[in-house]
Amino acid sequence: MHFAKMGINIFEMLPSAYRGLVISMLGYSYPQGKPDKNELFRVVKANEEWELVIELGETGIIRIVDVASEVAWLLNIENGHFFCFNGEDLEVFKAPFANANPVAARFLNEADILVADKNLGLCKYLPHSSSYYVVADECKGIPFVGINSITMDGYGGAYVSDATSSGYFKRDGKIYYVWFRDGDFDVELFQEGVAFPSCTAVSENDNLFIGEFATNSVIYVPSKAAQGRVETPSMFMYHDNGHGPTGLAVDSCSNVYASFEFCHDILVSSQNGSQKTCISLPECAKSFPSDIYIDGDWLYVVEGTEGALFRIKLSPSVIEREIPDCLEPLSWPWQL
C-alpha cells in the first residue's frame, strides 16, 4: 500500500517523541514546515578543490594539534612524533620518555602544549626544550584510564575525554573539565555514561559536541559556559557509514563537521541540526580521515593511511539545490 498516494503522511501521524527518534536515527532534523527535499546547504563552493598541504612520510593514526597562520602541528600517536610544518620546512619532535604515549594535544599558549597521554595522564610539553611532565592524572582520587582527546573552550579551560574501557554495552566513558588557574590544573567530572568518547568540539554558542565512537554518532550537551541552560543530552548527528567519529570541528557559523573512521566523507550539520551535507575527501586520499581541524575559512583533514594533510576552502553561506551523493541513499522522514 502506498500511503503517499492516499495523501497520508505517516511521519506526521507519529507522536512527537517518536518523530525525534526517527529523525535522529536517520541523521536528520525535522524543521518547521515541509522543506524542499532538494534544498540542502553546502559549506564549500561546487568548484572548490582540495589542496595537499604536506606528506609527512609516516602513516598511522595522526591527530591535528593546531593550525594557525598556515603553520600546522600534528601528532602521530603510534610513535609519539610531533610534526611542525611552516609551509616550507617540516620539523619532527619526539616525546622524551620511553613510557610516554601522547594521543592528543592542544596548545596552551605560544610555547606550551597540553598533551593527553594514555599512560601518564594530562601532561605539559615544551617541544623545543624537551620538557614533558604530568600536570594531572586523576579526578578527585579517581585515576584517568585512557584519556584520548582535548578541546580548549576559550574560557580558561579544556574538555578532556576518557574512553576508559567503555563500549556500546558498557557506557562508562567520561568527559572531564580542566581549569587552568595560576599554573594549577583543577579537574572535575563534566559528563559520564558515554559510549567510548573519541573527540569533542565546542561552538561559539556554548554547545559541546561529543563524538561517541561506539554508537557512530555525535552527542550534544550544553557546555560548562552555558550557565542556566537545562537541556537533556541528545543525539545530534548519526552516520550509517564508517566505524565511529575520529574528529570534530565547528566553523564560524557554528556548523558542525565530523570525520568517521573508514568513511570517505566529512559529514556536516547546521548548528540546529536542521540541514545536513557532506564533503567528499580528495580522490587521491583513502578512507581513513584520522582528524579534522578548522582554521579561519579552511577545513583541514589528515588522512592516516597516506600520512597526508589536506585542506579545502570553506564558504558556509553557500546554498545549492543539490543532494550530495553521500546522502542520496537516505530518505527524508516526510517521504515515509
Image (spheres, helix red, strand yellow):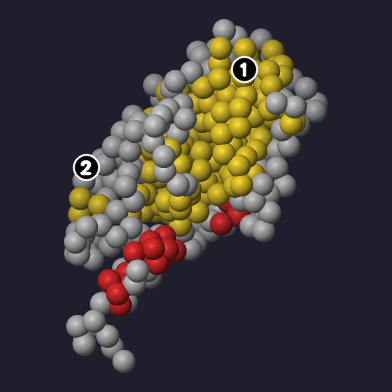
Residue at screen point 33% across, 54% down:
276
Relative image position of residue 174 (x, y in whole percent): 62, 40
Quarter of the image for the C terminus: give it. Answer: bottom left
Task: Kindly tell me whether residue 203 is visible in this rendering.
Answer: no
**Left or right placement of residue 58 versus residue 22 in this view:** right
**Badge 2 amino acid:** Ser
The picture quadrant where one finds residue 168 is bottom right
Seen at 51% across and 38% down, the residue is 200
Nearest the viewer among 52 and 163 is 163
| Residue 102: percent from left, percent from top | 68, 30
User: Which quadrant would residue 19 be assigned to in this image?
Assistant: bottom left
Considering only vertical position in the picture, is 81 above or below 200? above
Q: Which mark is residue 185?
A: 1
Q: Bin the neighbour count of mark 1 within 10 Å (Cα to Cα): few under 14, some 14-19, many 20 and up.
A: some
| Residue 4 shows up from this direction | yes
Residue 327 as seen in the image, left or right of residue 234: left
Q: Is residue 2 above or below residue 136?
A: below
**Residue 317: assigned label:** 2
Q: Which residue is most to the top?
A: 182
Which residue corresponds to the image point at 68% horizontal and 54% vertical from the top-left? 170
The amino acid at mark 1 is Phe
